Image: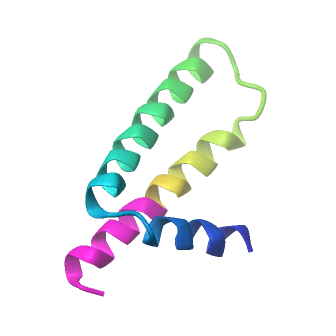
Amino acid sequence: MAKAKKADDYRSLDIEALKDKISDEQMRLKKTKFSHAVNPIENPLAIKAQRRNIARLKTEQRKRALGF
């Protein structure tokens, strides 16, 4: 259920907001990876979740570029 809710949230964003959200999430992922390299984070699966979240955003961006 949570995945469908996230996808619905991304569909409601306009193109510029979607681009901003992608760049913000990518920066957050880089910071998390760096933190994990220096000092192991409590939940390493958070990195996987962030990557998937970015993939969902990029998928929505691609759908709009193709006109779906």
Out of 16 and 29, give the one closest to the viewer: 16
- Vertical placement of residue 46 versus 19, above or below: above
Out of 1 and 45, give the one closest to the viewer: 1
- Vertical placement of residue 51 versus 43, above or below: below
Total residue callouts = 0
Q: Main secondary structure of the magenta part?
A: helix
Where does residue 64 sit, x and y in percent of width and height? 28, 76
Looking at the rendering, in which quadrant would you find the N terminus? bottom right
- Vertical placement of residue 15 versus 7, above or below: above
Furthest-bottom residue in this view = 68
Residue 65 in the magenta stretch? The answer is yes
Q: Quadrant of residue 43?
A: top right
Where does residue 67 sit, x and y in percent of width and height? 23, 85
Q: Which residue is painted at 41% across and 38% down in the image?
A: 24
Where does residue 63 sit, x and y in percent of width and height? 32, 78
Residue stretch in magenta: 56-68
Q: Which residue is painted at 52% across and 50% down in the image?
A: 51
Furthest-right residue in this view = 42
Q: Which residue is painted at 70% across and 43% down in the image?
A: 45
Q: Which residue is painted at 35% across and 56% down in the image?
A: 18
Looking at the rendering, in which quadrant would you find the C terminus? bottom left
Residue 49 relative to residue 66: left or right: right
Residue 10 relative to residue 66: left or right: right
Where does residue 39 sit, x and y in percent of width and height? 66, 13
Furthest-top residue in this view = 38
Colour scheme in use? rainbow
Residue 31 relative to residue 4: left or right: left
